[in-house]
Image (spheres, rainbow, N blue to C red):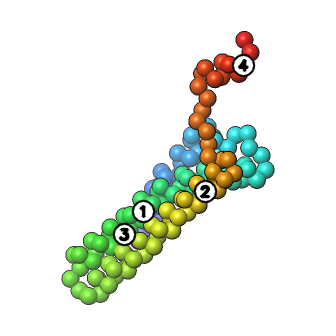
Amino acid sequence: MKKHIKYILLPTLSLTAVLPLFASAQGFFGPCFGFRGIDLLLCRISYLLNSVLPILLALGVVYFVWGVVQYVIGDSEEVKEKGKNHIIYGIIGLVVIIGLWGLVYIVANTFGLGGEPAPTSYQLRTLLPY
């Protein structure tokens, strides 16, 4: 059963989480169109981290909740200690993930890479000659 999870289920779930990044209509780094040099690099890093961080946040919450369940249900002292460690590491992981997310937003807004909304059809019509 463990080989089944290790060799089939984990790669399948990993690909399921990553493939939408490659299939987006705007391309892999869609909002970075028009940037050059260091701005392009920062925009791509920001876009990639904004795609991955919600998944990491969800995994951190699941890890924390699993530690709480282990701590509450555990009957032996060893299981309770293991649950307590899961809770502590889960909280530390969530703080790091949220801090990283904040850092991405600070860098993106500092360099003007926050991404503006797409122009409306009226704005496009006023820009283009008839």
Confirm whether residue 9 shows in the render.
no
Horizontal side, residue 116 vs residue 4: left or right: right
Q: Residues within 10 Å of mark 1 (few under 14, many from 20)?
A: some
Q: Nearer the viewer, residue 6 or 116?
A: 116
**Residue 33 location in percent, x, y?**
70, 40
Residue occupying image coordinates x 72% and y 19%: 128
Tag 1 residue: 59
Q: Are marks 1 and 4 in contact (CB under 8 Å)?
A: no
Residue 109 badge: none
Horizontal side, residue 110 vs residue 18: left or right: right
Q: Nearer the viewer, mark 1 or mark 4?
A: 4
Q: At label 1, which amino acid type do we have?
A: Leu
Tag 4 residue: 128
Tell me how far mark 4 sits from mark 2, CA to CA. 34 Å
Disc 3 secondary structure class: helix
Q: Nearer the viewer, mark 1 or mark 2?
A: 2
Residue occupying image coordinates x 32% and y 78%: 83
Q: In this rendering, is residue 63 above or below 82?
A: above
Tag 3 residue: 64
**Residue 115 location in percent, x, y?**
62, 42
Q: Are marks 4 and 2 in contact (CB under 8 Å)?
A: no
Disc 2 secondary structure class: helix
Q: Quadrant of the C terminus?
A: top right
Tell me how far mark 2 sits from mark 3, CA to CA. 27 Å
Confirm whether residue 75 shows in the render.
yes
